[in-house]
Amino acid sequence: MTDPQAKDAARREARARRDAIAASDHPAAAAAVRDRIAELAQDGHLPRGAAGGYWPLASELDARPALLHLKRLGHSIGLPVSGPRGTALLFRDWAPEAPMATGRYGIREPAEGRAVLRPSVLLVPLLAFDRSGHRLGYGAGYYDRTLDALRDDGAVIAVGVAFAAQEMPAVPVDAHDERLDWILTERETLRIRK
């Protein structure tokens, strides 16, 4: 098991690196990731069905342009609803004009009453990543539990979405940490071989 202090230090470093990215660079990075998602979809790497994403928090790369592109391709789109700590995320149907609520951590989420979806593609936020497909999250384990549950229930493609500056040589990992299948940044598309 990784030393929790080492993981916390890596999180602080990764957050500082991500926070240092100029806000003026965010829209171009989001557009580049959208284009990379379009290429993956066009090349047949993304299954049809529901795609899950996230509402950007603080300095996270905005995945909404990629999600809207997938919606135009016929995917239903879900955003997460955070339940109690230690549980998997639930995904509710999202459209830009649909009512939103403020969730557990102050993050925007689809309002109560929206249909629940099971993503076959999941765009995953992160603080840091490495080239072996490991991601460093915020420490609550929501995405690890979600990916574990989705993988137990069938296939899901996990796509990490990040700025290139969020790459680390090696992310500290524990046995329960779920690996990504792809990582998309504004600079490249990384396919993870397992």
Image (tube, helix red, strand yellow):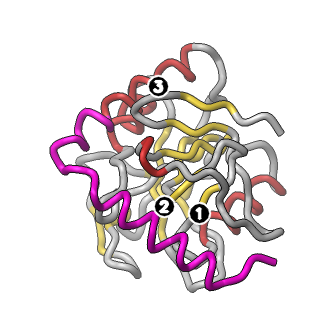
Q: Position of residue 118 (x, y in %)?
A: 63, 51
- Disc 1 designates what residue? 136
Identify the mark nearer the N-term, 2 or 1: 2
15 on left or right of 9:
left
Q: Position of residue 99 (x, y in %)?
A: 26, 60
- Give residue 127's mark: 2
The kind of secondary structure element at disc 1 is strand
Identify the mark nearer the N-term, 3 or 1: 3
Distance from label 2 to label 3 (Cα)?
20 Å
Please say whether residue 5 is one of the residues in the magenta stretch: yes
Which residue is located at x 50 percent, y 28 percent?
A: 188
Please report the bounds of the magenta region as a residue range.
1-30
- Give residue 36's mark: 3
41 on left or right of 175:
left
Residue occupying the far front of the picture:
169
The prevailing secondary structure element of the residues shown in magenta is: helix
What kind of residue is marked 1? Answer: Leu
**132 or 31, which lies in front?**
132
The kind of secondary structure element at disc 2 is loop
Badge 1: few (under 14), some or many (20 or more) residues near its Cα, within 10 Å?
many
